[in-house]
Image (spheres, coloured by chain):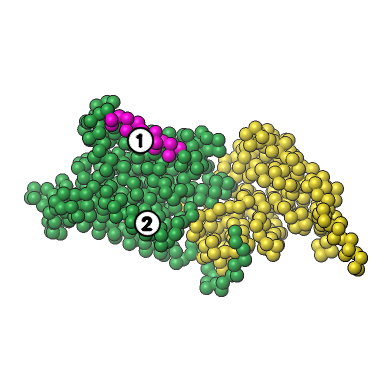
C-alpha cells in the first residue's frame, strides 16, 4: 500500500480529499431490452457510509447495483462516480475504485481461497507486471480482515456457506477499492452466518473507511447494519434516510404489501420488523387468554 | 451451497497467495512434462520401421553426410517429429482456451466448428479453384478455419447478451453442421477432392516436408503468445462475467483475443495435420487434474501434454503396424478414448 493517490488507497486517503458523494444516480433509467426496470431514479451514496437497499423481488435493486458497478449501460440518465460519468471511465479505472460482488458468484472447482483472493488483484496487474509485493500485502491483509488466514489453503468447495462468502468478500477487499457493492451477501446463509458476514461488512466500514452499498432482504438486519436505508418499489425510490426514519409500518405496507409491526430493538435501538401473517391474529387470541 | 460444515482443525496458518504445496506441485509437474516431451522426441527419432542407435541419430542431426541413417533422420523422422511437437503445442493450448471461453469441458476444435471449417477450405480449394499441391490447400484449410472461428465469434457476439459460453458453443455446433454439409456436397461431385479429403481427414503428421511446418510456425508462435496474454483475463472470467468486469476485464475484447488465439492455433495445426481432435480435450483435463483451476498453468501444461501425446501417438503408430503405420489421429482415438474414459470415471467430471 505504497500508493498514495487518494482514489486508490482507502486507508491512507486524507478525509478532505474525498468527495462527499461517491456515487450518484441522476435521472437513471435502466432497461433490459424494451423493459424498463428502473425509472428516472435519483440517489446519492455518501462517502464512508453503509447504504442498504431494500425492496421486493423485481423492484430493480440488483439492477441498480449493477449500474453502479458499470455492469449495465443506462437507457437514460447517468451514474456518476466521484462526479464523473462512470461509462466514460475505462473499465480498469473503475475496477480500481469500485468492487462488486454479485448475488451467487461461481468459482471453478478446486479453486483455493488464496487463489480466489489473489484474483482480486487483477486490476492492479498488467501483462508486463504480474505479481508484486503490493499484491502479496493486499492479499494477506484481505485474508486477515476476513479471518480467512487459517483457511487460505482450502478449496472453496470444502468451506461452509459463511466461510465461502467471507472468501468472496476477501477477494473484493484485495481489490482495494474504496467502494464495495454487495448484492445480497447473506443469500442462502443461516442466521448465524448472516450476522457473521454483516459484522464483517460493518468492520470494513468502521476500520477501513470503506463505502458500502448492499442489497439485503431481511428488513431487521438491514435496519441494524445500515447507516442509510433506501426503500425501492417498481424501479423507484420510495423512501431514504436513517433506518428509523425509513422503516415504518406504513412504508413496509406500501413497499412490500405486507402488514407488519415495527418495534424498537432494545439491544441496538434499530427498528425491528415483525410481519403479520393471515394467521397472526388467530394465534394471538388464545395466547392472550392463557396469559 | 450446503451449510455449516464444521471447520476441521487447521494444519497451517500461511498467508501465501497460493497454497504452497500446490505451487510446488505445479512446478514439479511442469518439469516432468518437459522431460517427458524430450524423451518422446528422442524415441520418435530413434524408433520406426528402421530403429536407429543414438550414435546414428547424433550423426544425422549434426554431421549429416548422406548415409542411410542420416536420410532417415533428416528427411523422415525429424520433420514428422517437429510437426507433431508444433501441432501438439498448438492444439493443447487452444483446447485449454476453448474450454475456458466456452466453460464447456468437451470443447475442442470439432465442437467450435473450426475443424469443419478447415476441412471445407481444403475441399473447396480443390473443387472450386483446382488447387493440387499440399502447399496450396493447407492455406485454404487455414482460411476455412479462420472463417469458421471468426464466424462463430461474430454470431456469438451479435446475439443479445454478447458472446457467452452458451452462444459460442451453439454457434460452433451450427458452424460444424454447415461446413460438414458443404464439404460432403463438394466431395460427392469431385473424385480428386474426395481422395485428398479422405487422407487429410484422418489426421497425420507424416508426409509433410519440414518446410511446411516452418512456414506455419509464425502463426503458431503468435497464437501461443496471444494465448498466454489471454490467460489472466480468462482466470477472472472463470469467476463469472460480472465479477470479471468488476475486476476490470473488458469481456468482449478478452473473448475476441481468445478466439483469435484459438483460430490461429487450431487453424494452422488442423490445416497442416488434418482434424486431430482429442489432444486439446485430453491435454486440458490432465493439466487441470495436475495443477488446479489456474488457466495460466492449465494452458502451458495442456500445450506440453498435447505435444507429448502427439509425438507419442505418432511413434506408436509406426511401431504397431510395421512396416506400415497407423495415422496419429487413429492412434490417439484408439488409445486415448479408453484411457480418457477411465480417467473421467475415476476422477469424476470437473465443474469449470
Q: Residue at x 92, y 65 (%)?
A: A289
Quarter of the figure with residue B122: top left
- State the quadrant of the N terminus of chain A: bottom right
- Label 2 crowd bin: few (<14), some (14–19), many (20+), radius 10 Å: few
- State the quadrant of the C terminus of chain A: bottom right
Which residue, given by chain and number where applicable, does mark 1 sit on?
Answer: B180
- Chain for disc number 1: B
Can you see residue A33? Answer: yes
Quarter of the figure with residue B55: bottom left
Q: Earlier in the sequence, mark 1 or mark 2?
A: 1
Give residue A171's position: percent from left, percent from top: 58, 56
Given residues B71 and B63, the one toward you in this image is B71
Q: Which chain is yellow?
A: A
Q: Secondary structure at mark 1?
A: helix
Given residues B351 and A149, the one toward you in this image is B351
Q: Is B252 situated left or right of B263 in this image?
A: right
Which residue, given by chain and number where applicable, does mark 2 sit on?
Answer: B341
- Chain for disc number 2: B
Q: Is residue B142 above or below residue B276?
A: above
Q: Secondary structure at mark 2?
A: helix
Q: Residue at x 71, y 52 (%)?
A: A216
Amino acid at each position: 500500500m505504497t500508493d498514495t493517490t487518494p482514489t486508490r488507497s482507502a486507508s491512507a486517503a486524507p478525509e478532505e480529499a474525498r468527495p462527499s458523494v461517491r456515487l450518484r444516480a441522476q435521472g437513471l433509467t435502466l432497461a433490459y431490452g424494451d423493459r424498463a426496470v428502473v425509472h428516472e431514479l435519483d440517489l446519492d451514496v455518501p462517502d464512508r457510509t453503509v447504504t442498504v437497499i431494500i425492496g421486493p423481488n423485481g423492484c430493480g435493486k440488483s439492477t441498480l447495483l449493477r449500474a453502479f458497478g458499470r455492469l449495465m449501460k443506462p437507457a437514460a440518465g447517468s451514474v456518476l462516480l466521484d462526479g464523473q460519468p462512470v461509462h466514460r471511465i475505462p473499465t480498469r479505472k473503475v475496477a480500481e475504485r469500485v468492487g462488486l460482488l454479485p448475488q451467487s458468484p461461481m468459482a471453478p472447482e478446486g479453486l483455493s481461497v488464496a487463489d480466489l483472493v489473489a484474483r482480486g488483484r487483477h486490476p492492479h496487474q498488467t501483462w508486463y507486471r504480474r505479481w508484486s509485493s503490493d499484491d502479496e500485502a493486499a492479499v494477506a491483509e484481505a485474508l486477515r480482515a476476513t479471518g480467512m488466514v487459517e483457511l487460505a489453503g482450502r478449496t472453496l468447495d470444502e468451506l461452509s456457506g459463511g466461510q465461502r462468502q467471507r472468501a468472496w468478500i476477501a477477494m473484493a477487499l484485495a481489490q482495494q477499492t474504496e467502494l464495495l457493492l454487495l448484492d445480497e451477501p447473506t443469500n442462502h446463509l443461516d442466521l448465524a452466518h448472516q450476522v457473521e458476514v454483516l459484522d464483517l461488512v460493518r468492520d470494513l466500514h468502521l476500520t477501513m473507511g470503506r463505502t458500502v452499498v448492499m442489497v439485503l432482504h431481511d428488513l431487521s438486519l438491514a435496519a441494524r447494519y445500515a447507516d442509510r436505508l433506501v426503500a425501492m418499489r417498481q424501479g423507484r425510490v420510495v423512501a431514504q434516510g436513517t433506518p428509523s426514519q425509513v422503516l415504518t409500518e406504513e412504508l413496509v405496507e406500501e413497499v412490500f404489501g405486507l402488514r407488519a409491526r415495527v418495534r424498537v430493538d432494545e439491544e441496538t435501538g434499530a427498528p425491528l420488523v415483525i410481519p403479520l401473517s393471515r394467521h397472526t391474529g388467530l394465534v394471538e387470541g388464545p395466547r392472550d387468554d392463557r396469559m | 451451497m450446503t451449510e455449516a460444515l464444521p471447520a476441521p482443525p487447521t494444519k497451517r496458518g500461511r498467508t501465501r497467495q497460493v497454497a504452497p504445496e500446490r505451487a510446488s506441485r505445479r512446478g514439479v509437474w511442469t518439469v516432468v512434462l518437459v522431460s517427458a516431451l524430450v524423451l518422446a522426441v528422442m524415441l520418435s527419432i530413434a524408433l520406426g520401421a528402421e530403429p536407429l542407435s543414438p550414435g546414428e541419430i547424433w550423426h544425422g542431426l549434426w554431421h549429416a553426410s548422406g548415409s542411410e541413417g542420416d536420410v532417415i533422420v533428416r528427411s523422415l523422422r525429424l520433420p514428422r517429429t517437429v510437426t507433431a511437437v508444433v501441432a501438439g503445442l498448438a492444439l493443447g493450448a487452444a483446447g485449454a482456451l476453448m474450454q475456458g471461453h466456452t466453460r464447456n469441458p468437451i470443447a475442442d476444435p470439432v465442437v467450435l466448428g473450426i475443424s469443419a471449417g478447415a476441412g471445407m477450405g481444403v475441399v473447396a480449394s480443390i473443387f472450386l479453384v483446382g488447387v493440387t499441391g499440399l502447399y496450396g490447400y493447407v492455406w485454404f484449410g487455414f482460411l476455412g478455419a479462420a472463417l469458421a472461428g471468426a464466424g462463430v465469434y461474430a454470431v456469438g457476439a451479435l446475439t443479445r447478451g454478447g458472446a457467452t459460453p452458451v452462444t459460442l458453443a451453439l454457434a460452433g455446433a451450427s458452424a460444424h453442421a454447415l461446413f460438414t454439409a458443404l464439404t460432403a456436397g463438394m466431395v460427392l461431385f469431385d473424385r480428386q477432392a474426395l481422395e485428398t479429403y479422405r487422407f487429410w481427414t484422418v489426421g497425420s503428421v507424416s508426409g509433410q516436408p519440414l518446410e511446411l511446418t516452418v512456414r506455419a510456425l509464425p502463426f503458431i508462435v503468435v497464437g501461443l503468445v496471444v494465448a498466454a496474454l489471454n490467460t489472466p483475463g480468462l482466470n477472472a472470467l472463470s469467476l463469472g462475467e460480472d465479477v470479471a468486469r468488476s475486476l476490470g476485464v473488458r469481456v468482449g475484447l478478452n473473448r475476441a483475443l481468445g478466439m483469435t488465439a484459438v483460430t490461429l492455433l487450431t487453424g494452422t495445426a488442423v490445416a497442416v495435420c488434418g482434424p486431430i481432435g482429442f489432444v486439446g480435450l485430453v491435454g486440458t483435463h490432465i493439466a487441470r487434474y495436475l495443477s488446479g483451476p489456474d488457466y495460466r498453468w492449465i494452458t502451458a501444461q495442456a500445450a506440453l501434454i498435447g505435444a507429448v501425446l502427439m509425438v507419442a501417438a505418432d511413434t506408436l503408430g509406426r511401431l504397431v503396424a510395421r512396416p506400415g503405420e497407423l495415422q496419429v489421429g487413429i492412434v490417439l482415438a484408439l488409445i486415448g478414448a479408453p484411457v480418457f474414459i477411465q480417467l473421467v470415471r475415476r476422477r469424476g467430471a470437473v465443474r469449470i
